[in-house]
Amino acid sequence: MRSGGPRGRKSTSDRSNAILLINEAVESGASLSKACERLGITEQTYYRWVKLDKTFDSYEDRRTFADHSNPVNKITPAERQEILDTVNSEEFSSMSPCQILPILADKGTYIASERTFYRVLNREKMQNHRGISQESYKHAKPTPYCATAPNQV
């Protein structure tokens, strides 16, 4: 289960799914600590969520001081799609974002920052060697020779 937000905050639906999965795993014979570890939460977090459910009949985070809003500068799905369309277009398919952005700037177009381009590509698992550049080869370690007497090497 991926982290939900800042500081790993999970949404209400993620919390309820996690509780169901953990309860199912424990009923099947798994230990609570292993089930929680598998989902990336601590046992204390599990117990806190269960207590929330028993007390308020909901897994919703009820901290009044916590800011639960999305950042104002978060890109929209349309902007994310525009980045993907641009990067995958015929003209830019073999270029990295650091090469694409100056060309777009010359045309007077601004979609997002270079870092945002890289974030979107990483999230979509598209950040790899583009065009004619290739991934570096891993060379085998040479066989070590050790002389134990004169004239052996």
Image (spheres, helix red, strand yellow):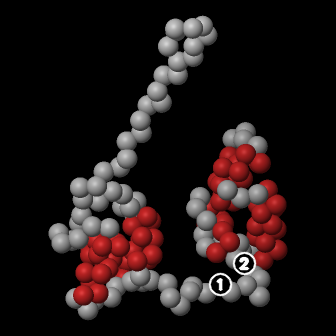
Residue found 72% across the figure and 53% down from its top: 36
- In percent of width and height, residue 9 lies at 66, 72
Question: What's the CA distance linking mark 2 and mark 1?
Answer: 9 Å
- In percent of width and height, residue 15 lies at 66, 66
Q: Is 27 rendered above or below residue 145? A: below
The answer to whether residue 112 is visible is yes
> What is the count of numbered marks?
2
Q: Residues within 10 Å of mark 2 (few under 14, many from 20)?
A: some
Q: Residue furthest left?
A: 90
Which is nearer the eye, 35 or 120? 120
Which residue corresponds to mark 2? 61
Query: Of tags 2 and 1, which is closer to the observer?
Result: 1
Q: Is residue 60 left or right of residue 119?
A: right
Which numbered marker is on residue 68? 1
Marks 2 & 1, CB-CB < 8 Å contact: yes
Q: Residues within 10 Å of mark 1 (few under 14, many from 20)?
A: few
Image-quadrant location for residue 78: bottom left
Image-quadrant location for residue 98: bottom left
Image-quadrant location for residue 139: top left
Which is nearer the eye, 93 or 74? 93
Q: Is 146 rendered above or below residue 16? A: above
| Sooner in the amino-acid sequence: mark 2 or mark 1 | 2
- In percent of width and height, residue 113 lies at 41, 82
Q: Amino acid at mark 2?
A: Asp
Q: Amino acid at mark 1?
A: His
Q: Is residue 12 left or right of residue 110?
A: right
